[in-house]
Amino acid sequence: MSIFRPRYRDIRSRAAFTVYSANGDYGKFIDALNKSPIQFYSLNIRRGRLSGFIRCSDINRLTVLAEEQHLTVEIAAKKGLYYVTRGYHLRFGAVIGFILAIFMTSFFSDRTAVIEIGGCVNIPEQRILDHLKSEGIYIGSDLSKTDLRAAEQHILIMDKDIAWIGIRRTGSRVLAEIQEIDTKPPMTDSAAPRNIIAARDAQIKSVRILQGQLIPIVGDGVKKGDILVSGVVDTKYGRNYYVHSQGQITGVYTEKMTFSAEFCSEERICTGEIEKKALSLFGKRFVYFSEGDTPSDHEYYEEEFPIKIGKIVLPVSIVEMHYRAMETAEISRTEDEVRALLTEREERYEKDLLTDDAVITDKEVSEICEGNVMTHTVTYTLEGEIGTPQQIFARYEGWSDP
């Protein structure tokens, strides 16, 4: 199947010219023409005359160049889409423009140009956009064929985290307002009796008791599950009562982690990046620039830059699409490179995974190389909160607080 494409030379503006002189010597003129910024093509000499085509914007330059060489220039014809349609604009231009204006107005009045989401706190906006798209509401969609009330009901059924959603339309703008379900934290009785127990093996460094009876003292070692602060308080009268233990127990404890990496391994690496640019019009993309074909194995990310007029965001944007060509390759590292890789992993763990209330006071690293693998066993000495609450299930039988 062949595809018809109009030839560029049939629509671009161009002028046919003829240069002649008494002696018919055009060598110097052609040399000067080659050195000038004038764009010319189809140059030939027939019957002692030099003829060809140039851009209409270069006519004056050609005339000056010919006069410098004492030649005569004649412009035979001006061709191109502009000059063909120029003769018809008085008769058809106004009518065609009016018809196009009516068509464009009627077409775009029912098309979604902008979608705005309001009320999102914990629910990401992309999730709401996906729900709207499943109901036929997206950039460029025909709003005349969409039942907004039915879409609201369907989204409420699909997403249990949404308590209410309202979708309204203003021209080509769609506004979706949502109200999320209020997920309250589980209720805890602040007066319920409880102990504070050790969450891990540690040595107590400091204590601050607000309520309850401290069992171990500063400097004692405790094991995971030992009671640190008891919610059962004894009185001097030989009786006891229950309290809601509160306090902060700081202890010193150790944590061991293992990190390993291979000297030779197969890894995915980037071999290059291809960029494409597209014009997004009502959600439809038209690629106007490409550095090459899309790699079969690639990682993709894009950046979108909407076009604005003042504070008005138009349904037109420039999209830059990036394709990172990936392939699996055999990577060999030296001992220093593997050690640096493990150190980087350790720093990432220390930054992202350790709790905020723990402070690293000491760090010991043991390195072992076995075969193709280097292993770092890291022992961290930490100082932080070691207590965790544990409820007391007590039966109250005729006692009262003293």
Image: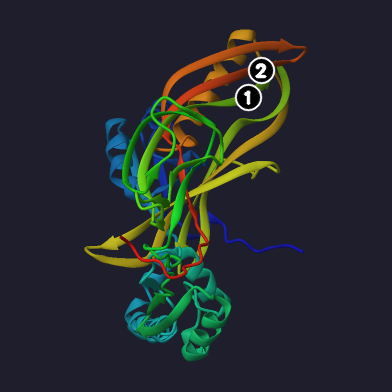
Residue 271, quarter of picture: top right
Q: Is 230 in front, or is 336?
A: 230
- Residue 194 at x, y = what percent? 45, 55
| Residue 65 visible within the image | yes
Left or right: where 121 falls relative to 286: left
What kind of element bears circle 2? strand
Tell me which residue sits at (35%, 72%) in the image: 118
- Of all residues, the one furthest to the front in this rendering is 237
Figure quadrant of the C terminus = bottom left
Q: Is mark 1 on a helix, strand or loop?
A: strand
Q: Is residue 66 left or right of residue 112?
A: left
Q: Give the amino acid type for the residue marked by disc 1 in the picture.
A: Thr
Q: Residue 375 carries which label?
A: 2
Looking at the picture, tell me which residue is in the foreground, 160 or 274.
160
Mark 2: which amino acid? Thr
C-alpha gap between disc 2 and disc 1: 7 Å
In this picture, is 140 found above or below 220? below
Q: Horizontal and vertical percent for residue 99?
A: 40, 86
Name the image quarter holding residue 72. Answer: top left
Question: Which residue is depicted at the point 75% across and 12% down?
Answer: 370
Mark 2 surroundings within 10 Å by alpha-carbon count, few (fewer than 14), some (14 through 19), many (20 or more): some
Residue at left offset 37%, top offset 48%: 212
* Mark seen at residue 362: none
- Res 77 visible: no
Compared to 14, does 140 lie above or below? below
C-beta proximity under 8 Å, tags 2 and 1: yes
Residue 68, x across and y down, in percent: 27, 31
The spot of residue 381 in percent (x, y) is 48, 22
Q: How many marks?
A: 2
In the rendered image, which residue does mark 1 sit on?
258
